[in-house]
Amino acid sequence: MELKLDTPIRYVPGVGPVMAGRLDTLGIRTVKDLLFYPPFRYDDFSLISPIARVQPGETVTVGGEITAFRNAFTKSGKKLQQAQLTDETGSIDVIWFNQPFLVRTLPVGTQARLAGKIDWFGHKIVMTSPVYEKTEGSHTSMDGSMRSFSISQTESLHTSRLVPIYPETVGVTSKWLRGRIAFILEQCITQLFEYLPDSILSTYRLMAIQKSIEQIHYPTDTTTAAAARHRLAFDEFLFLVLTALEQKRIWETTQQADSILLPSEELVSFISSLAFQLTGDQKQTVAEILNDLAKPFPMNRLLEGDVGSGKTVVAAIAMYATFRRGYQSVLMAPTQILAEQHYNTISQLFKPLGVGVGLVVSKRGLDSRRSLPRTPLRGGNDKEEKFDILVGTHALLSESINFDNVGLIVIDEQQRFGVNQRLLIREKAQTAKTPHLLTMTATPIPRTVALTVYGNLSLSVLHQMPIGRKRVKTWVVPKEKREAAYSWIKKQLKGNHGQTFIICPLIEESETLQTVKAATKEYDTLKKQIFPDLHLALLHGRMKAAEKTKALDTFRSGKVDILVTTPVVEVGIDIPNATIMLIEAADRFGLSQLHQLRGRVGRGVLDSYCLLFTESEDDATIKRLKALETIHNGPELAEVDLKLRGPGELFGTKQHGVPILKFASFRDTGLIREVQSAAGEIFKSDPTLSHFPLLREKLKRDTIVQVSQD
Ligand code: ADP
Ligand code: MG
């Protein structure tokens, strides 16, 4: 059968169903996936040497005839293969370890090329564990007769050149991949078409696509390898940016919204009724949002701000404007605890103004809410109450909840929701027009990522903290200081009447039974053995809603000194009297997560502290944690995390819809700037890409990722 780019990989000769299964784990499903499978480095075997001239320390390729081969044993009893390779100039000893089958692959008399490092072995020069390539048959010369395809300067794939090394998996070696890739390059490379217009190729000095794919696998030299990667990385970013721009264009031209415009006196008087002055950034953001709300197409804005930067009040102001124009607002939060907290904040703010605020949490939660001043929405056949603002969890999505003329949707901690949930809430609200959308997150998103992946969104950032916010003093506490730390906490709690969170170790990403057990056990120990004189409460995700609320309420009221909890409190809880945050097994968290947890304290007038407990004695781990002692801002910590642990860890890549890049890196700011300007050029002159049909088609076909929000 003829191979096409989209042919499933198992039909490639030499692959078959078993190998196809293994390739699948590497993300390779089609011929094209394999063509675009990037090596992560090259072994440089391009130095070809006559045997007589090799030097210890060199990495070289030598060619000749196998003139001896035997299996032997090392002194320690390991299997050792000893061979000899001979050319016109001399012979060299070659050894491999633990590869007894080689005696059959490379029997005496075989013509072969070997590439590897030359070392001293005792008093002799040997080549150790080289890669090998038989040169039997018609293509035996070193400089080689050309293959029909142009990539391979010689017929060699494994020696005498820059040899690509790929990410491997069980049963799939780089050597095997090289063979299959060479084969499909020969068969299919001409099917790759150039989708970038000449003007872009020449302005940005980009290598042509076919050549880039050839050169990324079988580069002539390191310069062309770099140029090939540059081109492919450029494409990767370009498609992200163009996709985002396209989404934005479609959003703005096809979606209609009711314009929400409020006389500024009204807003000013509402804002001046708040208990505090807005920070400059909050004012700026409010202005941006109001500006969006006034437009006839829906806002699609992401509000990013470190924990405690005051995102809620910004959203509340937008909800106020929405209410005043006669529309409903919906605020969705990821946990019940947070939804209840928002409900309280928003009610306090709006009740005096006669705004109806409703709370929607899950059924189990509903029964427990009798104590709330207002009954939340009832589902089913009950006569529904009408609210101007609905606050809730994903329970808002349930069928029994009806929306009425929604003008604004706010999603808090948006990274906690799946793409589908975010989509659903909007569809559900869909009346005649589309509601305005404001999403909020405390996850610092590096500029480079925002510019590429979130290009379809408008972005507001709260850099400033409200005045008077105290810096949380932070210490990494090693094992031997644990007892001392406990006594210190006792003293603190007696002295200044603050309160403490104790966060149990993160066991798994989501809260499992195991996590709950660990927390319960820890709670018992702490209560009986460590803090018998203090009041403790337990909070974890598997508790009944009523119990959770009770635990949190008693903590909030000050009746409880220490709240022992799983990492569920990470999100959004606001308890000003809490002063100490103790985190067990802190090394299991990312720095950004720790910073979020730390943000739960230091919200009131008292001095606050964060104790990072760790049993780890690993220097790198301790050093990483100690970054929190000196760095107190989220974005900066995120940069440290990005350096130390890579972007996946930073964003929880999947949650944010941030794609895993193959060729490019989010650290490459220079390239992103170039791509931005290229995309801008293309888009400005021709937003529908009607003059770039190939590019347009390519974009459509490969919509690379579902980008962020939609
Ligand atoms: P986050 O951005 O983490 O969601 P919140 O909206 O929960 O932060 O705000 C944290 C605390 O700061 C709340 O108690 C809120 O009332 C308070 N706050 C917000 N803005 C200001 C401000 N400008 N001045 C003083 N306090 C503020
Ligand atoms: Mg918040």
Image (spheres, grey):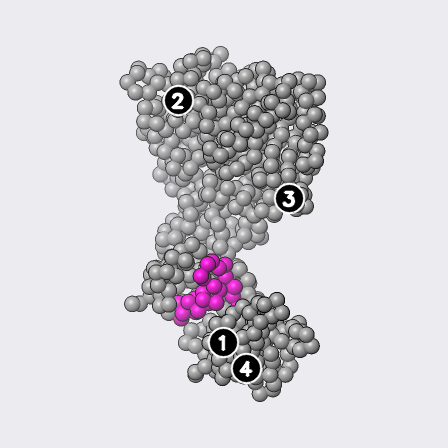
Element on which disc 2 rests: helix
Is 89 left or right of 405, judged from the image as shown? right
Amino acid type of the residue tagged 4 in the rendering: Ala
Picture residue at 47% right of the left edge, 28% below the top = 541
Picture residue at 52% right of the left edge, 42% below the top = 651
Q: Earlier in the sequence, mark 2 or mark 4?
A: 4
Task: Pick whichever, 399 or 541, lies toward us.
Answer: 541
Q: Earlier in the sequence, mark 3 or mark 1?
A: 1
Residue 103 numbered tag: 1
Which residue is tagged 2?
Answer: 364
Which residue is tagged 4?
Answer: 68
Is 345 left or right of 119, judged from the image as shown? left
In the rendered image, residue 533, in percent from the top left (x then y), is placed at: 64, 18
Q: Earlier in the sequence, mark 2 or mark 3?
A: 2
Amino acid type of the residue tagged 1 in the rendering: Val
Q: Which residues are magenta?
A: 161-186
Check disc 2: other Cα within 10 Å, few if <14, some if 14-19, many if 20+: few
Residue 279 sits above or below residue 654 on the image: above
